[in-house]
């Protein structure tokens, strides 16, 4: 039990550090919501390797603390809605993926993260006009999700299974 708590805490800290570092990088494109999503590397790896309950805890801790350190209430809502929708999408997909297909989880997660954020924005601002960004966010989700998914896949190959033995 202690090893599990320590592992989850370390992974949450790594995800938080990646999130905070990325928040300091100026936007590459002037489109709201387009970013690499480096913290999602940890989420994808944890969900695939150690299981849903731990990965959900890691994700929620990262979102809560990341919002406290770098954001505002709207950013918390966007992160939470995007993070939870991405989490559910990857959770439903993960049993179908082989070890060399983990990158797909990164792509699906990024696309659903953007969908969750757009939905939250539509609700918060009372307009569906935010969905005009959908094509751009889908494309950016494919590209950034491919990157984060490939990194998660590489980590799954490099990190010994004993560190991330699946628990569910």
Image: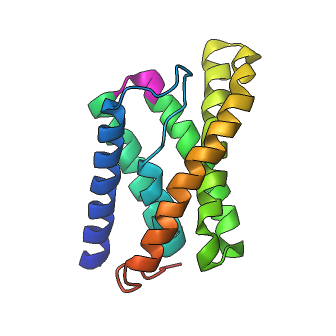
Question: In this view of the protein, which residue sits in the foreground, 102 or 56?
Answer: 102
Does the rendering let one see residue 30? yes
Does the rendering let one see residue 53? no
Determine the residue located farthest toward the front in the rendered image.
28
Which x, y percent locates residue 19?
Answer: 36, 42
Which x, y percent locates residue 48?
Answer: 54, 70
Residue at image coords 59%, 78%: 99
Which quadrant, please, contains the N terminus? bottom left
Residue at image coords 24%, 76%: 2
Q: Is residue 5 magenta?
A: no
Q: In the picture provided, is 141 more to the left or to the right than 29? A: right
Residue at image coords 47%, 70%: 154
Q: Is residue 6 above or below residue 65?
A: below
Q: In the picture provided, is 77 more to the left or to the right than 57? A: right
Q: Main secondary structure of the magenta part?
A: helix
Which x, y percent locates residue 64?
Answer: 37, 40
> Which contiguous range is marked in magenta?
71-75
Q: In the picture provided, is 120 more to the left or to the right than 7? A: right
Residue at image coords 48%, 79%: 167
How many marks do you count on the picture? Answer: 0
Q: Is residue 74 magenta?
A: yes
Determine the residue located farthest toward the bottom in the rendered image.
162
């Amino acid at each position: 039990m202690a090893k599990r708590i320590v592992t989850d805490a370390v992974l949450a800290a790594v995800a938080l550090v990646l999130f905070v570092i990325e928040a300091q990088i100026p936007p590459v494109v002037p489109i709201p919501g387009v970013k690499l999503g480096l913290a999602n590397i940890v989420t994808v790896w944890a969900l695939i390797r150690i299981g849903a309950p731990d990965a959900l805890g890691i994700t929620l801790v990262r979102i809560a603390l990341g919002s406290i350190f770098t954001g505002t209430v709207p950013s918390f809502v966007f992160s939470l809605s995007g993070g939870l929708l991405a989490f559910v999408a990857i959770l439903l997909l993960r049993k179908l993926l082989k070890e060399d297909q983990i990158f797909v989880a990164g792509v699906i997660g990024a696309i659903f993260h953007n969908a969750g954020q757009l939905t939250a924005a539509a609700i918060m601002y009372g307009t569906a006009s935010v969905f005009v960004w959908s094509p751009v966010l889908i494309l950016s989700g494919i590209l950034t999700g491919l990157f984060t998914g490939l990194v998660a896949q590489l980590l799954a190959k490099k990190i010994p299974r004993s560190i991330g033995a699946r628990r569910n």
